[in-house]
Amino acid sequence: VYIALFKPLRVSRHQFKKVLNCMKLVRSLKYQEIYAQEKVTKVDSLSLVLSGK
């Protein structure tokens, strides 16, 4: 994940590790399950979608 997504954005490994240390949960979604909707879902966290739309 670091090499593919963060390194091209010039995020250092140290910065990446700080983000990982804040991680509270990994959530897998089922097919067509909605995670967030624009102008509906409260934005109070950082999410990273690894695959899907």
Image (cartoon, rainbow, N blue to C red):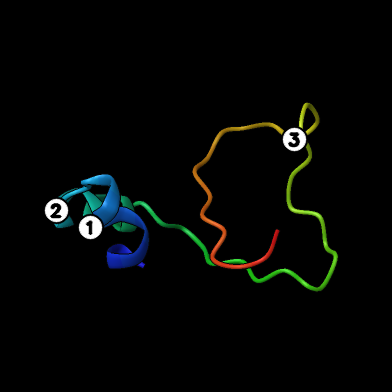
Secondary structure found at label 1 = helix
Residue 33 marker: none
Dot 1 amino acid type: Lys
Under mark 3, the amino acid is Thr
Which of these two is toward me, 2 or 20? 2
Question: What is the spatial separation of the Cα atoms under label 2 and label 1, in whole angstroms?
Answer: 5 Å
Q: Residue 41, which numbered label?
A: 3
Residue 6 coordinates in the image, percent (x, y): 31, 54
> What's the residue at 79%, 39% (across, down)?
37
Q: Could you give the CA–CA distance between mark 2 and mark 3, rounded to whole angstroms?
A: 30 Å
User: Which residue was labeled with disc 2?
Assistant: 14
Q: Are marks 2 and 1 in contact (CB under 8 Å)?
A: yes
Quadrant in the picture for the C terminus:
bottom right
Q: Badge 1 local density, few (<14 within 10 Å), some, or many (20+)?
A: few
Q: Are marks 2 and 3 in contact (CB under 8 Å)?
A: no
Label 2's element? Answer: helix
